[in-house]
Amino acid sequence: MVDAPYVEGHLDAARAVLSRLEAIALTQRRRSPRSPRSPVPPRSPRLSPVHIPLSPSNTLQVPHIKVRRHRSLPDPHAIQARKKQQQLERLQAQRSASVRLPGHRTIPEGNGRFRIIVKKSKPLLGIAIEGGADTTQPLPRIISIHNSGAAFEAGGLKVGHIILEVDGIQMSKRPHHEVAQLIAHAFYSTDKDQVEFVVVETCRNMESEVRRTSIMVFE
């Protein structure tokens, strides 16, 4: 048989060990750190709308600034006017060329001489001459060409041309009135539909040296 005091001693020892273990566990539980709580983000402040009344006192005033064109820049109005003038000149040149008859011809003969055929496409010849054997200008010279006449439409005769022949008739040694009559007769009084001129160019600018001692206008 087991001695009762012996058993009782073992139970007391076991209780002491159990009590010691519980004390150790309690001590460890107290010493163990708590898990940190996740920080709570701060709340953003709520913005309240601000109402700004529109009044002349708080509106932005923008000063009116006049932009000045630099002197070196071209005037756009002048450029536009120049373009219109160029277009008008081209149009007039096209119209002038379009109304010229195919019978008008200018034939170079060398040494500054030209044979020019003028069709009688207009009621007027439209040239003015000066000179003749009885003047200081021995040969007749064209000093003006009217833009409404056949000579202008032909396009071959020019101011300053010296007239050597008209329809094969020499103009040398003829006084001014006779030259004028021959040219007028060739254009107005013959049955031919054209007048043939032989002219020569001069080396000087005749327009600035026109001598009006004897002038006949063929209209």
Image (cartoon, rainbow, N blue to C red):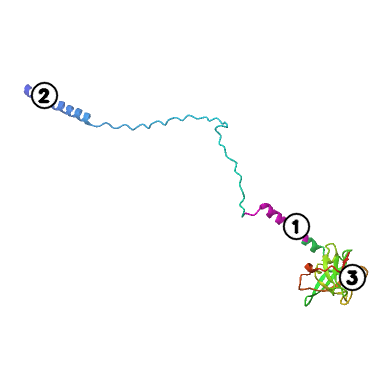
Three-letter residue code for mark 3? Ala
Helix, strand or loop under label 1: helix
Q: What mark, if any, has residue 12 been given in the picture? A: 2
Spatial separation of the CA atoms under disc 1 and disc 3: 36 Å
By secondary structure, the bulk of the magenta-drawn segment is best described as helix
Q: Which class describes the residues within 10 Å of circle 3: few (<14), some (14-19), or many (20+)? A: many
Q: Is residue 91 magenta?
A: yes
Side of 22 relative to 183 (left or right): left
Q: Which residue is mark 3?
A: 180
Of mark 2 and mark 3, the one earlier in the sequence is 2
Q: Nearer the viewer, residue 122 or 67?
A: 67
Q: Kindly identify the residue that appears in the image at 11 percent across and 24 percent down.
A: 12
Q: Taking 41 as reference, is 77 above or below it?
A: below
Magenta stretch? 73-92
Q: Nearer the viewer, residue 101 or 187?
A: 187
Q: Which class describes the residues within 10 Å of circle 2: few (<14), some (14-19), or many (20+)? A: few
Residue 192 appears in the rendering: no
Of mark 1 and mark 3, the one earlier in the sequence is 1
Spatial separation of the CA atoms under disc 2 and disc 3: 170 Å
Q: Which residue is mark 1?
A: 88
Q: Kindly identify the residue that appears in the image at 22 percent across and 28 percent down.
A: 30
